[in-house]
């Protein structure tokens, strides 16, 4: 993209798709992984797309008034995307986040002009590991603040602009970059918007593409498994929510569970072998793709999303 843009909002999307050939050789698997480098968006994550999609859809249908305050719960990435989009468009933004998320995220949102409200974790929760119960506390506070400010709730778990953004942009971009030579897609789910949007776009073009939901071990609620370990280090998803709205009508060819340690190891290997500095969920996605290339998708090409930047985790044990 070699043109002058009117704002950073126009720089969202059209991120590179990169083959991870050095990594697949290191792990001695047959096949290819192609990675969408979403950390190259202005807010350093895939959530920039959802933030833009939700705000612009609300502007279009009139549910967001000029100058109205916007509120949303976030693990940091959606909040960063909304801070960026709202700041440019002139909407005050309040991000509500668990104290279990990394401090880098809160600092970045504040730098972009957001007011950040941090919510205590449950007494039994582990710092740095946000559980579904912790997220429920954040949701309650977001509802309270929304009512107090008569705010527009961005509501990434339900507003269609989230999944539509990936249906209209991320999925078609992956298809076009591979010239349709893609056999599978895996995604670590938070709201499920990325998975639902990309899967729908890819399967409309080729129904035989196999798409897999990725969740943490012990917290695979979407797969219908008993939740035995709701706390895990893979920030931004795996909230033990078994009834995600975006997954209700989305085709799922399989479910994969990865551990926090496996995600950490692969994220570090991505940085070392490919020069791709992603976060925990990026490691989870690539770990799931590697597992498929060892088994039923040996010799195939699998698409993954590098969800966000490793810079957002410098205070965590991902890099320590």
Image (cartoon, rainbow, N blue to C red):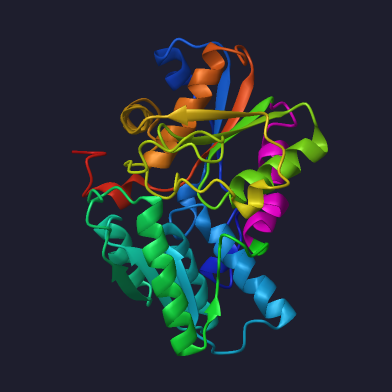
Q: Residue at x 62, y 12 (%)?
A: 299
Viewer-proximal residue, 94 or 225?
225
Viewer-proximal residue, 314 or 97?
97
- The magenta region covers 162-182
Instruction: From this view, report whether residue 86 is shown above or below residue 312.
Output: below
Instruction: From this view, report whether residue 288 is shown above or below residue 108.
Output: above
Picture quadrant of residue 297:
top right
Compared across the picture, whether 26 is left or right of 241 comes to left
Question: Where's residue 109, x and y in %?
Answer: 36, 68
Q: Is residue 170 visible?
A: no
Q: Is residue 30 visible?
A: yes
Instruction: From this view, report whether residue 269 is shown above or below residue 133.
Output: above
Question: Where's residue 69, x and y in %?
Answer: 49, 84
Compared across the picture, whether 209 is left or right of 219 comes to right
Q: How many marks?
A: 0
Q: Residue at x 51, y 40 (%)?
A: 221
Instruction: From this view, report whether residue 126 is shown above or below residue 75.
Output: above
Question: Where's residue 107, x and y in %?
Answer: 28, 66
Q: Is residue 229 magenta?
A: no
Quarter of the picture holding the C terminus: top left
Q: Is residue 178 magenta?
A: yes
């Amino acid at each position: 993209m070699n043109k002058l843009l009117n704002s950073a909002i126009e720089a969202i999307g059209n991120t590179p798709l990169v083959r991870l050939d050095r990594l697949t050789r290191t792990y001695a698997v047959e096949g290819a992984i192609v990675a969408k480098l979403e950390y190259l968006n202005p807010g350093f994550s895939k959530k920039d797309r959802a933030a833009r999609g939700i705000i612009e859809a609300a502007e279009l249908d009139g549910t967001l008034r000029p100058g109205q305050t916007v509120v949303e719960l976030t693990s940091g990435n959606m909040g960063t995307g909304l801070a960026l989009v709202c700041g440019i468009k002139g909407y005050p933004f309040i991000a509500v986040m668990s104290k279990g998320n990394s401090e880098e995220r809160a600092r970045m949102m504040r730098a972009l002009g957001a007011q950040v409200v941090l919510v205590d974790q449950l007494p039994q929760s582990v710092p740095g590991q946000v559980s579904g119960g912790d997220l429920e506390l954040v949701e309650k506070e977001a509802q309270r603040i929304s009512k107090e400010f008569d705010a527009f709730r961005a509501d990434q778990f339900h507003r269609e602009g989230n999944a539509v953004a990936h249906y209209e942009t991320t999925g078609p971009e992956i298809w076009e970059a591979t010239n349709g030579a893609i056999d599978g897609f895996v995604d670590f789910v938070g709201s499920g918007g990325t998975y639902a949007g990309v899967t729908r776009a890819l399967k409309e073009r080729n129904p035989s593409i196999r798409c897999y939901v990725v969740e943490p071990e012990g917290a695979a609620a979407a797969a219908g498994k008993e939740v035995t370990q709701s706390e895990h280090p893979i920030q931004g998803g795996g909230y033990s929510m078994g009834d995600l709205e975006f997954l209700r009508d989305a085709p799922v060819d399989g479910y994969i569970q990865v551990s926090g340690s496996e995600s950490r190891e692969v994220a570090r290997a991505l940085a070392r072998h490919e020069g791709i500095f992603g976060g925990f969920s990026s490691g989870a996605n690539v770990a799931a793709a590697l597992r498929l290339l060892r088994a039923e998708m040996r010799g195939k090409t699998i698409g993954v999303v590098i969800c966000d930047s490793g810079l957002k985790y410098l205070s965590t044990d991902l890099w320590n």
